[in-house]
Image (spheres, helix red, strand yellow):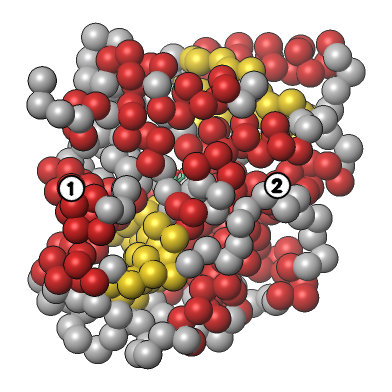
């Protein structure tokens, strides 16, 4: 699998391998031996999982002769921020179309910090052209038409990257991560009983599962839905597993290897939950570790609940794939800031 992966164009963006670290104090709280795969430390632009996907997405864009990358996300998208930085570093124009998909900002929770702080602030700093649209189809159609016109006006060529960087090419980044992690797991004193990861558009989970199996690890991967119900995530993950298997010319992991749990999503994407707030506090205070309110905080809330319920037993450690997202903290001052 490693050899096949090496045949795809790849833009070097991430600092790799990321460390696999023991979390002794959080292990006590979780009631299970806990390790973190630190993909929050991929390096570029405050790190995170998308840097890995962007190595392959921008590699493909350059190979196709594109001078622009267009992508999409919620207003506080980490993927958008990392795309903006990756484009800056690679000499590409970046067009971001960001949707007001989360009921925050304006006069609501988060206020101007949500509208202008966190990832949004960084998108602008990295020089991206940012279009913010309301959450309906007409607004999106108009924004896409305007992007097309801008690219055409300068005689450019764009690669259109889906939300989260989750197409088969982007998913290759997590195949590489899975191969990397499989090697690190072999060096642990005991075999892990599970890897836990936040799931939104699904490319991270699909790639990770493919790479772990390709690297000889059969550890179960437990996905925590943070974007939509599992019944909608499942088909998306399945399509990505098919797509990446086709690109690599390998067999895909079986459908029953995809574990998804949407009980920690709460009222919806980007909306805080008590479990997320507790996970953020515990990680920060016990390990000096920053989680984020939208993704890694909810995934850790699930892991803590499972650990406390005895789900993992004492058969081996649990690995938390830390996918990053800390810039989002600055868009949630009402959740993580000092009392007002
Ligand atoms: C911090 C963080 N964690 C997890 C994810 C989920 O990754 P995926 O969309 O590949 O499921 C994202 C993607 O948006 C993210 O920004």
Up-down relation of residue 272 to residue 47 (above or below)? above
At mark 2, the secondary structure is helix
Relative image position of residue 43 (x, y in whole percent) = 56, 49
Which residue is identified by label 1? 281
Q: Residue at x 48, y 37 (%)?
A: 78
* Along the line of sight, the residue nearer the viewer: 165 or 188: 188
Q: How many marks?
A: 2
Q: CA distance from mark 2 to mark 1?
A: 34 Å
Up-down relation of residue 50 to residue 130 (above or below)? below
Q: Could you tell which of marks 2 and 1 lies nearer the N-terminus?
A: 2
Q: Quadrant of residue 271?
A: top left
Which residue is identified by label 2? 57
Task: Report whether residue 53 is seen.
Answer: no
* Along the line of sight, the residue nearer the viewer: 70 or 124: 124
Residue 183's label in the rendered image is none
- For mark 2, does the 10 Å Cα neighbourhood hold few (<14), some (14 to 19), or many (20 or more) residues? many
Relative image position of residue 93 (x, y in whole percent) = 74, 26
Relative image position of residue 111 (x, y in whole percent) = 28, 15
- Whether ligand 1 has any atom under 8 Å from the Cβ at mark 2 is answered as no
Relative image position of residue 201 (x, y in whole percent) = 48, 47
From the image, which quarter does the C terminus lie in?
top left
- Which one is in front in this view, the residue at disc 2 or the one at disc 1? 1
């Amino acid at each position: 699998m490693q050899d096949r992966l090496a045949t795809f164009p790849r833009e070097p963006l991430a600092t790799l391998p990321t460390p696999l670290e023991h979390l002794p104090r959080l292990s006590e709280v979780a009631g299970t031996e806990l390790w973190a795969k630190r993909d929050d430390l991929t390096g570029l632009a405050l790190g995170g999982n998308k840097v890995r996907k962007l190595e392959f997405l921008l590699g493909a864009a350059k190979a196709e002769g594109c001078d622009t990358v267009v992508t999409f996300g919620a207003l506080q998208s980490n993927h958008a921020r990392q795309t903006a930085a990756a484009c800056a570093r690679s000499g590409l124009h970046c067009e971001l179309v960001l949707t007001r998909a989360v009921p925050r900002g304006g006069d609501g929770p988060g206020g101007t910090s949500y509208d202008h702080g966190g990832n949004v602030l960084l998108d602008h700093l990295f020089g991206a052209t940012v279009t913010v649209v309301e959450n309906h189809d007409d607004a999106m159609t108009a924004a896409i038409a305007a992007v097309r016109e801008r690219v055409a006006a300068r005689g450019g060529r764009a690669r259109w990257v889906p939300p989260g960087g989750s197409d088969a090419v982007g998913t290759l980044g997590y195949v590489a991560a899975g191969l990397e992690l499989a090697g690190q797991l072999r060096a642990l004193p005991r075999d892990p009983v599970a890897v836990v990861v936040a799931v939104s558009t699904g490319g991270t989970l699909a790639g990770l599962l493919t790479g772990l199996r390709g690297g000889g690890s059969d550890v179960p991967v437990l996905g925590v839905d943070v974007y939509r119900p599992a019944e909608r995530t499942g088909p998306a993950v399945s399509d990505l597993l098919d797509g990446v298997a086709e690109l690599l010319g390998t067999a895909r992991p079986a459908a029953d290897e995809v574990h998804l749990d949407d009980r920690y999503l709460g009222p919806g994407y980007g909306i805080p939950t008590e479990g997320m707030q507790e996970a953020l506090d515990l990680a920060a205070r016990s390990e000096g570790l920053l989680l984020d309110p939208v993704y890694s905080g909810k995934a850790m809330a699930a892991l803590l609940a499972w650990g406390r319920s005895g789900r993992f037993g004492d058969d081996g450690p649990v690995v938390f794939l830390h996918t990053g997202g800390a810039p989002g903290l600055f868009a949630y001052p009402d959740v993580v800031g000092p009392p007002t």
